[in-house]
Amino acid sequence: MKLRFGYSIFATLLIISARSQQFEERVTTASNVRLTVTNAGTFGNAFRGYRDGTGRQSCEYPAGSGIEHLFEGGIWVGGVRRGDGSILVSTSALDAPQGYAPGRAGFEFTIPVGAPPMQERSALTDSRFYSPSAVSHQDFIAVFNDVSQTVPGTSIPITGHQFPMNIQVTQETYNWNYSFSDFFVIVNYKIKNIGNAAFDSLYVALWNNTVVRNVKVTPAGAGGSVFYSQGGNGYMDSLGLAYCYDATGDVGFTESYIGQKFLGAEDKFGFHHFLLDSTFNKKTGQWVKENFKAHYNAWQFNNSSNPIFFFPTSDELRYNKMTAGLNHHPCWNEPTSSACQSTLGVNLQAELNKSGNRSDIVSVGPFNDFLPGDEIIVAFAYVVAKKFEDGNPNSVNSEVQRKNLITNANWVQVAYNGEDKNFNGILDPGEDKDGDGKITRFILPAPPDIPRTRLEPSNGKIDIYWSDNSLYSIDPILQEMDFEGFRIYLTKPGFDVVSVQDIASAFVLVGEYDIINGVGNDVGLDRIRLTTPVKFDGDTIEYHFKYTIDNLLNGWQYAVSVTAFDRGDQSLNLEKLESSRLANQFRVFPGMPANENMKENEPFVYPNPYYYGSSWEGISNFQEETRKIYFANLPKRCKISIYNPVGDLIDEILHDENYNGSDIRWFRSFAAENPDRNRFSGGEHAWDLLSKNTQIISRGLYLYTVEDLETNKRYTGNFVIIK
């Protein structure tokens, strides 16, 4: 089996320099968002995943589409130190053309030497990361602080970080696989004062450099600065939501928005949100007028010369950006007013709507009397959404185009609110659903459990088996079993090689079965229920249902998913909820089963002859590495040897019936992110038409032998390459 990987010098240096402080990064995979999260407080990876050979996404949505939304982001904290009135700001990320690197200016939060590694938890009971303390289907937990003025474990100074605030941040990110919530990632910060100084007028911000481009259409960074300068920006005051979209870049291939949204905050005085007129003060037990605000600011990336949209280069300027938002300036809503014309004299929202490369922040505060040992909790969210098509160009950026973004932003707020149904920050009668005496946040209604599924492809068909675990799921809100039925989905051949791969939209419903006397069509489950449950060798799961899809094309990829849905509850305004199609998707390749007799069933190659640019190959930034042909009718375990006409060995492949495609790039580019989710028939193996030295082969006739490693019998055949 061949494995080919490429690594850049940049990635190697980053790993070496970060090793001293145990730098880690993970990518969210529960939802349909692929967001890089690090334990140094940064989000995104400055697109280095496309340069270092890992292919790790920065903030891709939908998963597999190649549509990226974020260069880099991170937390800012700033306040006024009591006693001397000094303004201090600590940032985990800042405008940096190369992105994160230990010691680089603006990356002031670090991982202390000996700190525990980034933790992953899951509320899914069948996950290897299952924990009863998990909040979502995939939690990442990291702890970092701004204490050190040098990179921990080294003598490398952190540029510009002479005055730390001495705060520690516990960063928790949450994401779910539900179809109604797989478009956001929540970021929950717990900020603790671990120093000796007290702070007043403290603000917390989420900074981002959002860049929406399709890297399958335009490779990341192609064209230099032009690649990054095609985005439009905006802010919706009522939602506390800043957003970005592709105005003039890969239009037609990037029909989506990314937003950063403030959800809520709490400190020792109580709950805070800019939409509240008053807040309940836990110290005094009284309602007091709320002066808490959300501020939005934006500037040209790494450009300090623009008189309005300038990059802040000092703590004082950064603090000013956090406390004097553009959204509170007269030029925001009243650009023709005298108050605007006598000051900035521009329409701020119109300027932000123009193409450019901008950084922006959503900051909230003030938090006062932040004493040593005190803790503040602040929650934000990354929200993505497809543009709602209204027939107009992206640059119009109409409210209609933002319709899906607004809907998704409201969903994430519902998730944050949890038991706080009337959103006042106190536990009112009837809200304490779990009986723990406090507000439980981050609660979503739940569909039935995902059916445990097994795929068995064969010649021109796929047999789908699944268990009955979904039937016994208990809804966390209704506290009863409310299973209604199953749905089976399939994609059409060729969905995987388009410029924008969106599996959720590519799925086609091919079967739906629901219980009798339910709220659906009353089709019943008898048509799919097995008379006797079946088990497979090496698999402990018992399968109770089966559905067969036939008349399929061998060698082509199909995505298959089985979901379960519930009946909802109109009295509680709960719609029917369906388990995630994406979380249960498999990539299946129909083909010939393992061959038990090569004499009667000769191995063969297809397509033969092969023409360069076969329709199943698609377009890739690694075009010559993403070609493929199939060897078929193979024994369970065999060796395939490929020769040119003069007998030179071109390549050698080891095959077994558990082949998953991970040995060639086509499957890493177009198939399942986790190769264990690829399903083959057992008797086929793909080849990328590259020699064992990764050289492009020439056109012509080629010979091959298949040696059965169990019987030592051989078969010899040939195929033709035509360019």
Image: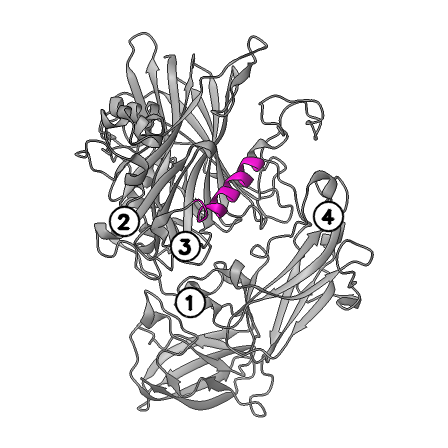
Q: Disc 3 versus disc 4: distance between alpha carbons? A: 36 Å
Q: Position of residue 171 (x, y in %)?
A: 46, 33
Quadrant in the rendering for residue 542? bottom right
**Does the CB distance between marks 3 and 4 fall below 8 Å?**
no
Q: Nearer the viewer, mark 3 or mark 1?
A: 3
Task: Name the mark on residue 228.
Answer: 2
**For marks 3 and 2 on the same chain, the one whose residue lies earlier in the sequence:** 2
Q: Disc 3 versus disc 2: distance between alpha carbons? A: 16 Å
Residue located at (32% from left, 72% from top): 624
Task: Name the mark on residue 473.
Answer: 4
Q: Looking at the magenta stretch, what is its main secondary structure?
A: helix
Residue density around tag 4, few if under 14, some if 14–19, many if 20 or more, within 10 Å: some
- For this view, does 239 lie left or right of residue 199? right
**Does the CB distance between marks 3 and 2 fall below 8 Å?**
no
- For this view, does 44 lie left or right of residue 339? right
Q: Dot 3: what SS?
A: loop
Q: Position of residue 587 (x, y in %)?
A: 54, 66
Classify the position of the C terminus by image quarter.
bottom left
